[in-house]
Amino acid sequence: MATPASTGRGESAGTAPESRLSLLKEREFVTLWMLGALASIIRWLEMLAIGVYVFDVTGSPFLVAVMTVARMAPLALAGMLSGVVAEYVNRRTLLIAGFGLMAVQSAGLALWSTLTPVPIWALIVASFANGLFWTTDFSARRTIMAEVCGVRRIGIAMSLDSITSNGTRMLGPALGGLLLQLIGLDGAFILGIFVYLIGTGLAFSLVRPPDGSGDDQGILASMLEGLRYIRTNRALTATLMITIVFNVWGFPMTSMVPVIGKDFLQLSAFPVGLLMSAEGVGATIAALLITAYSQPRIYKRLYFFGVFLYLDMILLFAYTGWPWLSGAWLLILGLGGAAFASMQAALVLLYTKPEYRSRVMGVLAVCIGTGPLGFIHLGLLADWVGAPLALVIMALEGILALLIVAIIWPEVD
């Protein structure tokens, strides 16, 4: 089993009780934490609003899934490149550019949707652009967080980050559904303008991190060296494989919540947003508990069994005919999702030497970017056999894949 990478400052992997919440007193960490929350809330808001809008316009579960595919594809296509680029340029600059460009895009879409209905192709392009921005969350923002907190507090830092990430999964969809129902799609984009502008200002306020320290071997050579490093680290490889399982067979279920809510449960936009928010409620509760009580010795188990619980709850959610019970299954599903999400970046950073972190976080983005394969698979299945049965098939496939990974890489537990 690989041991946590040293920071070179003599820090241990354990977390002293007095340091558990000490990060909240550090301005740089809090700023990075808030940047993650802002990006996450608008991401989930847009995913719900665009998903419901596309289903209302087209009636196609497949096209609903395509919207999320477009948002996640850049992680697979550009995640590794983003990780290497972050070693050559200033990471603060990447964050400023990302938030600023997203504000401009939101302004354009808000104006467009106010004047005339936005075509599906334009929403696909916009989702893809948002996905490019998403890659910087791994290679820039979270890598800076690791530098700020050090190995000793990585687990706590990622758990705190998970609280806001999952909390926004509760607030974002509900707000998106409300805006869509009361104002229309342009309401979601108008809010996005303000959120991204606030994020741009916060990114400017960061203390300037050191310039990129990439060597002269070139971008391609750096990428290949990072892959070789991962291949020699079984614990790191196992962690990344679990990420693939979750994103191919677990996370795609989020695209079917609007379909189940609208078509199967006969709900309007706002109740669908509340239904989708139930996952965020459970995830927020779990993230709070993990931050307060988790210890490094159980990180791997939280990670593995969180995915297992998530997949099991998809089976129960698929055919539940009562909205309140559907929400209960999604709440429990959120508990598993938070256990996975809290530990994902933490384990990757703990198992990686500091000089490889940007590159490995870029590879993590690529693993997350495998999700479009699952979204396409689920979307096609839903068009063929209906959303409920498609979810059951996907969950069973995911459980089987998870067990195979556990057999090949016993380091996961």
Image (spheres, helix red, strand yellow):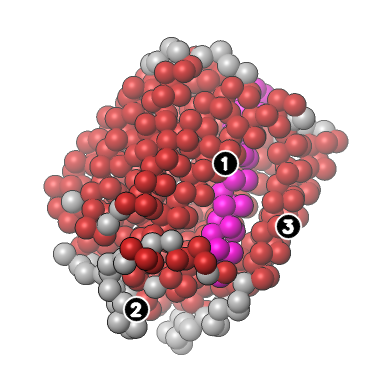
Q: Is residue 28 left or right of residue 191?
A: left
Q: Amino acid at mark 3?
A: Leu
Q: Amino acid at mark 2?
A: Thr
Which of marks 2 and 3 precedes in the sequence?
A: 2
The residue that appears at 74% across and 50% down in the rendered structure is 193
The residue that appears at 55% across and 82% down in the rendered structure is 211
**81 in magenta:** no
The local secondary structure at tag 3 comes to: helix
Residue 45 visible in rendering = yes
Check the image and report above or below for 384 versus 223.
Answer: above
Q: CA distance from mark 3 to mark 1?
A: 17 Å
Return the residue nearer the eye: 52 or 159.
Answer: 159
Q: Amino acid at mark 1?
A: Trp
Residue 388 visible in rendering = no
Label 2: how many Cα within 10 Å (few below 14, some 14–19, many 20+): some
Q: CA distance from mark 2 to mark 1?
A: 34 Å
Quadrant of the rendered image containing residue 401: top left
Query: Percent from the top left, x then y, of residue 361?
Result: 41, 64
Label 3: how many Cα within 10 Å (few below 14, some 14–19, many 20+): some
The residue that appears at 27% across and 38% down in the rendered structure is 308
Q: Is residue 132 left or right of residue 391?
A: right
The label on residue 197 is: 3
Query: Percent from the top left, x then y, of residue 224?
Result: 36, 72
Q: Is residue 1 left or right of residue 300?
A: left
Q: Which residue is mark 2?
A: 7
The magenta-colored residue range is 28-57
Check the image and report above or below for 406 versus 136.
Answer: above
Q: Which residue is mark 1?
A: 44
Return the residue nearer the eye: 162 or 138.
Answer: 162
The answer to whether mark 2 and mark 1 are in CB contact below 8 A is no
Q: Is residue 110 left or right of residue 131?
A: right
